[in-house]
Amino acid sequence: MEMIETRLPTADWTQVVRPSLLYRLARLFGSNPDILSFAGGAPDPHLCPAVDLANAAHQTMSENKGALQYGRDLAALKRQIQALMAQRGVDCTEEQISITAGGQHGMDILTRLFLNPGGQVMLEELVYTGIQQTVMPFQPEILTIPNHSETGLDLDVLQEHLSGGARPAFLYTIPTAHNPVGVSLSREHRRRLVDLARRYQLPVIEDDAYGFLDYDEPHNTPLKALDPDWVIYLGTFSKVLAPGLRLGWIVSPASLTANILVIKQLSMLSVAPLSQHIVSTYLAAHDFAAHIAEIQRQYCVRRNAMLEAMQRHLPPQAQWTRPSGGLFVWVKLPPGIDTEELVFQAVEEDRVAYIPGKAFVTDPDNRNYDSYLRLSFARYGPELIEEGIVRLGRTLRKAVSGQPAHGVGEMHP
Amino acid sequence: MEMIETRLPTADWTQVVRPSLLYRLARLFGSNPDILSFAGGAPDPHLCPAVDLANAAHQTMSENKGALQYGRDLAALKRQIQALMAQRGVDCTEEQISITAGGQHGMDILTRLFLNPGGQVMLEELVYTGIQQTVMPFQPEILTIPNHSETGLDLDVLQEHLSGGARPAFLYTIPTAHNPVGVSLSREHRRRLVDLARRYQLPVIEDDAYGFLDYDEPHNTPLKALDPDWVIYLGTFSKVLAPGLRLGWIVSPASLTANILVIKQLSMLSVAPLSQHIVSTYLAAHDFAAHIAEIQRQYCVRRNAMLEAMQRHLPPQAQWTRPSGGLFVWVKLPPGIDTEELVFQAVEEDRVAYIPGKAFVTDPDNRNYDSYLRLSFARYGPELIEEGIVRLGRTLRKAVSGQPAHGVGEMHP
């Protein structure tokens, strides 16, 4: 018998897998209790109503009415989501709602719904890595759109692409409290974006992961509320309830619901009935609006604490955004500093961690964000945030010593 | 402004979506309490340890140690799965185990791992619809292999394809208690199949969904135990614990684990930590082997009850398989009877339901199984099984009246 090669032949796209720096670093730094980590994007476990959810789980599981069986989208949960969407200013029917196993599952479903192999998609040059991973197996042509720290997505460039004939399968964006940049699109830019979407028939995937963590007045209106036809909305319970449930939702035009269901079935038969029943039971028994108000208040305090500590403790060569919501502050250091190299020094010498800017670039050859970093203020209360920023200040002062100051503090104060 | 077409442009494959007759009928018939339904493939909720799982959930959630947070594959659960695999005769390392959101998620992961768009796959002519759905977006060339009611997968045809130069991305099969045919591959056929896989470098996806429901002696050995290199194993907690958890696993060569992880991340970040922690907590506190032995005993009683009732109450024109495990009996009626048409009459007139054979054909133009049907004996105890078969006998006698008997009872008694 001939020699056997036991390395199995896998699909072509697996030859060009780009591992996620974000996941690697968030895990590396998140597990050491001596390190103050501003790296991960997880919500604070202490703000999760664990006992209430545990009680909801016990109730619905011991009743054995569906939580443990095969299922489909739970009608009661869809009605509860419909009410949540109304709070965000989005008017939708139950038929337009599809429950997902979290925001990432929603991205995967919509990518498979819209994108052909080798097709074209439109992403910001800095964007949440999850969508980059989701499109990867399609080996797409990616049109990258600049995103500015002050104003977000560059609509002029977007329009140039579209008026030049580009017809991407979709644009994915996070208009409210962008990850990693922290910026929220202005009302005027939102209007212009949905006008462009309509004019050029561009499906826009709006990831509203941080929409319920929008601290400052006036609150941002989802794109979905401005255009029900071309915007597909992604919601999630991960940031406001518990990511371990893996539960979120899509609001789409009703014409897409049947195909979304097919993709859900082929991906996992249905979203876990267990998680659906737990959340529905929890929502029926508790004042969720009050819960959201409370975690908003807590995260707002933390944002303020981080911004104030940065003002006090970071060297004048650092600049940063002031996010009106979400969990992240985006920091710019002088060119020439490599924040990926620096993070290992920060961890080793000063016991503080962050995510380097390059973790978020869509184009791996884009070196423009090598001197940026992302800080999450989600995990700690004000005292530990202050301590962590003191430590980060030490790291950064060592790195920039001798560099000229190029402005002080917030990029748009 | 020009007229707007609001029907969003979706990926090419969505133009050829083939809706699942299985899901449609299982749901249609499963919800009416007046109907005795042998349609769905769900395990009996009464054999699910609901209270034990509810207690495990309450414990792990209120401890708030990870069940509600972002996570990865839980090491403790992987060790528990490793021990379960040892019970099935499969020796594997933790590194070879990847946790999935159920068997369907495992199929989706492996399809994305192995199959290129427009590539080639090998499926039996009758096969679980989930794998048909999973490959659909790839618009593959499907090589169909006959499966015989008595012996299963036709290895001569499989070898002809391979020796003729076919190099499919994978073969998917259910060697133990096949869905829908109920047949288990003999030891000799298993050996020959893995020999062919090695010789022709064919990845074989072994779906062992019913491997822990293998009633008769001697028990079947998984393909994975016969070849660790070319067989990728799919396991699930759906049939032995609770499908609502959406929890299963893959055992693959370790060289595939990194890419499997990438696909899991892009599909849903991680399998729900909630389900992982609940099952791990449950397994640590209970005698799972005793639980499996008990549900095996129960389902074996039901299989025997169904086979005996069929012998007594079905007309002599019907023939059927005697499954050595799993949940399904496969029934053949005389040619010319359309079991899809007949099922509506069965439900309407006799209050009994099943799944028509054509729900499982890989090639939609294959009419060879229009006169077959699948019965599940999972849902009821012996008395209701008897009553349901009495009703089915009525339906079938009306349908075959005047047709010649072509044998009595089991196809291979």
Image (cartoon, coloured by chain):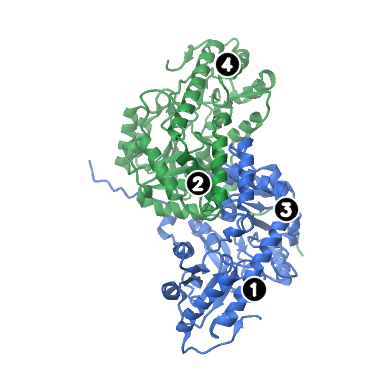
Chain colours: A green, B blue
Q: Nearer the viewer, mark 4 or mark 3?
A: 3
Which residue is label 4 attached to? Answer: A386
Query: Could you give the CA–CA distance between mark 3 and mark 2, rounded to whole angstroms?
Result: 28 Å
Residue A362 visible in the current orientation: no
Which residue is the site of mark 3?
A: B287
* Residue placed under numbered mark 2 in the picture: A276
Q: CA distance from mark 4 to mark 3?
A: 49 Å
Q: Secondary structure at mark 4?
A: helix
Q: Residues within 10 Å of mark 2 (few under 14, many from 20)?
A: many
Question: What secondary structure is found at the residue carrying circle 3?
Answer: loop
Residue A216 locus on image (x, y percent): 40, 23
Label pair 4/2, CB-CB below 8 angstroms: no
Amino acid type of disc 4?
Glu
Q: Which mark is residue B304?
A: 1
Q: Secondary structure at mark 2?
A: helix
Q: Is residue A87 above or below residue B353?
A: above
Separation of residues labelled 1 and 3 (CA atoms): 26 Å
Q: Chain of mark 1?
A: B
Label 3 neighbourhood size at 10 Å, few (<14), some (14-19), many (20+)?
few
Check contact, mark 1 vs mark 3: CB within 8 A.
Answer: no
Give the amino acid at mark 2. Gln
| Outermost residue, left side | B1
Residue found at x 62% / y 49%: B53
Callout 1 amino acid: Asn
